[in-house]
Image (cartoon, rainbow, N blue to C red):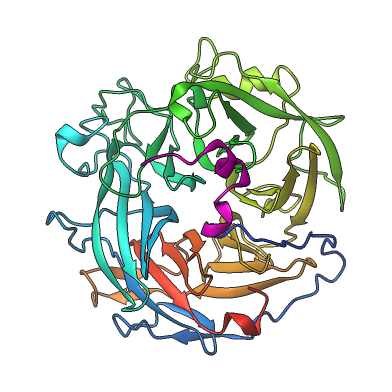
Amino acid sequence: MSLPSRRSFLIGTAGVFGAAAGLYFFRQRLTGGWPFSPGYGPLYPTRDEATGLELICLPKGFRYTSFGWTKDSLVDGSPTPSSHDGMAVVRQEGTRLTLIRNHERSGRATPMGREADRFDPNGAGGCTALVFDTAREELLEARVSLAGTYNNCAGGLTPWGTWLSCEETVVGPESRGKKDERLDLKQEHGWVFEVPATGLAEPKPIPAMGRFVHEAVCVDPLTGIVYLTEDANPAGLYRYTPEVPGQLHRGGTLEMLAVQGRSDLRKGVPAHAEYRVRWVPIDEPTRAHTPGSSDGKGVFHQGAQQGGASFARLEGIFYAAGRIYLTATSGGEANQGQVWEYTPGEEKLRLVFESPSIEVLNMPDNLCVSPQGCLLLCEDGERVGQRLQGITPDGRIFPFAQNNLQLQGQKNGFVGDFRATEWAGVCFSPDGKWLFANLQTPGITLAITGPWQKGPF
């Protein structure tokens, strides 16, 4: 795919893919009695237009269709892999949207795609590309787009229309699985890969972006800088400044966020807290471990030794209208999550929201910003009935959707109560009329539409 001109790159195309123009600023943090916004109203079990099953709960007037279930056939006849995770719309051709979807697969699961196309012949993870027609309201095509990677959790969209897929692991040829079984991996893992909107990705990692327990990324379209989260506790926030904007494989520098006057942000953060920040260099981005150990903290410790800040499991990250939003999944006094806002250029970090309990917000993970400036958060906790939660620009939280997935073999033989499975991959279509999201287990993609104009999205 040809890259944009320098001028068009600096202007940025992220707004086409959901970055909210005219985003309102979060100026009110929930306190005291935690006011509750009704959003679009109460949630009700709602039938899936593809299967007739009540997979999720939605407000009145909204409807959805499911597609891309685990075990559904891909175009090459192979089954759709499991463990649906991060996702974004990377291409639009009329009413046809192409989504790239991560698969957080690990262990000795059957690898995706042809062996000749894999980064690691025994790597179980990767990505699939899905072409969804919003006029016909159905999936047209699904295929493998990255193969042979491992534990592809989240990632992020680029302004030039590709997907960055992140490995949430630092396993390698000597690694063993949960039951001490050999994984038989042939490559070191823990990288970021770039995936095109069409065709199959060349499975080539970007070493300069670091080898650590990656989660998600976002790109500032004004500078080309890539921001990266780390799913660990403690975890760091990183930025990658490429030598050539838009050409990440050509090298760049990796740095870690440091907060003036505070090194640990996991607990004890005051309401409305705002900090000045700076960035410290990571001299050895490919050092996965601290010397003499196998802890997976080699990159983090390089930054921490220079004053880098500690977060509790940084996962989702999203750029919108000059600001970057990120979730610390287990941060805060209740260990139920924090939402942070970083402003590039001003070098400020602000606490937007901290959950006081599992019922208010249960461990936010992937997130996006709606066309009207609301945050939309995927829960990934233990609450039965995991939710997509909205936070309005004035700081009110409300549930928009709830997992209601209980199966008795009606689709692809799946049986079980999956209501506690996480949401992932939340993203809007370029016109804001469709919301896409995944239920990770057993692995389903949903396309949701309805009267968005009646509420804050």
Is residue 195 depicted above or below 453 in this figure?
Answer: above
| Residue 177 belongs to the span the image colors magenta | no
Instruction: Report the number of numbered marks.
Output: 0
Instruction: Find residue 207 and report its horizontal and vertical position in percent.
Output: 45, 22
- Give x and y (percent) for residue 22: 72, 62
Residue in the picture at 33% in, 45% down: 105
Q: Nearer the viewer, residue 385 or 327?
A: 327
Residue extending farthest left: 77
Q: Is residue 381 visible?
A: no
Give the quadrant of the C terminus. bottom right
Does the magenta-highlighted stretch encompass residue 9? Answer: yes
Q: Nearer the viewer, residue 451 or 33?
A: 451
Q: Residue at x 33, y 41 (%)?
A: 106
Farthest top residue? 292
195 on left or right of 59: left
What is the x, y in percent for residue 287?
A: 50, 16
Q: State which region is magenta.
A: 1-17
**Left or right of 376 on screen, residue 419:** left
Is 430 positioned to the left or the right of 406 in the image? right
Front residue of this view, candidates 142 and 122: 142
**Displayed quadrant of residue 140:** bottom left
Residue 149 vs residue 190: left or right?
Answer: left
**Residue 315 image point, x, y percent:** 57, 46
Q: Is residue 193 visible?
A: yes
In this view, the residue farthest toward the bottom is 60
- Looking at the image, is 454 positioned above or below residue 436? below
Position of 72 relative to 106 (above/below): below
Quadrant of the image containing the N terminus:
top left
